[in-house]
Amino acid sequence: MNTLVIDTNILISALIKEGLIREILTNLKLNFIFPELSLEDIYFYKTDIMRKAKINEKQFYTLLLRLLKYVKIIPLDIINSFREEAHEIMGKIDKEDTIFIATALAFNCPIWSDDKHFQKQNKIKILTTKDIIDLTK
C-alpha cells in the first residue's frame, strides 16, 4: 500500500487539531490523494473549522496549504469514468461519499476514513486511523 484516498473528515480533523491525524499526514511517507470536488466541503465548513481550531481565516488558509503539500488533489476528469461504478457501490449507503469510492477505484487503493458507513460496502478496502497506526508499527 503506497497510495491512500483520504476522506473529508480526515482533512478536517487535521485542520482542527494538531495531533495524530495531522502527524500521519505530514510525516508518513505515503501518497495521500483527495478528490478535487471535495475541497468544496472544506470551504463549506471553513467557519466551523476556524471556530473549533480557534484560528482566523489567514491561519486557516496557511494551514490548509501546508497540509495540501502532503496531499495530491485529484481532478474530476481523472475519476469521472469510475463514478457510475462508485455509485453502485456506495450510492445506497451515502451518496456524498461516492466520490471517494470513485477515486479509490481510479487509483486501485484503499480509503483512509474513520466513518463507519464506508465499512458497509465490501469493494474498496477501508483503513481507519488505528489501522494506519498498526501498519506503521
Image (cartoon, grey):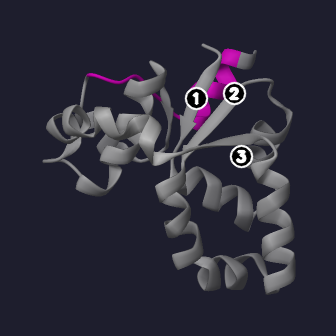
Please report whichever mark, 2 or 1, sits nearer to the chain's N-terminal start: 1
Tags 2 and 1 in contact by the CB under 8 Å rule?
A: yes
User: Looking at the figure, which quarter contains the N terminus?
Assistant: top right
What amino acid does circle 2 point to? Asn
Element on which disc 3 rests: helix
For discs 2 and 3, the disc positioned in front in the rendered view = 2
Image quadrant where residue 79 sits = top left
- Residue bearing mark 1: 4
Identify the residue at image location x=37%, y=46%. 99
Cα distance in 3D space between marks 2 and 1: 6 Å
- Residue bearing mark 2: 31
- Residue bearing mark 3: 21
Instruction: Please determine whether, in this image, residue 80 is positioned above or below residue 85.
Output: below
Q: Is residue 86 left or right of residue 39?
A: left
Instruction: Please determine whether, in this image, residue 1 is positioned above or below residue 50.
Output: above
Q: Is residue 78 left or right of residue 29?
A: left
Element on which disc 2 rests: strand
Can residue 40 be seen here? The reply is: yes
Where is residue 14 drawn, in percent x and y?
71, 56
Where is residue 55 drawn, in percent x and y?
82, 81
Identify the residue at image location x=80%, y=24%. 29
Element on which disc 1 rests: strand
- Magenta stretch encompasses residue 29: no
Q: Nearer the viewer, residue 9 or 32?
A: 32
Q: Is residue 68 left or right of residue 100?
A: right
What amino acid does circle 3 point to? Ile
Cα distance in 3D space between marks 3 and 1: 14 Å
Extent of the magenta region = 123-135
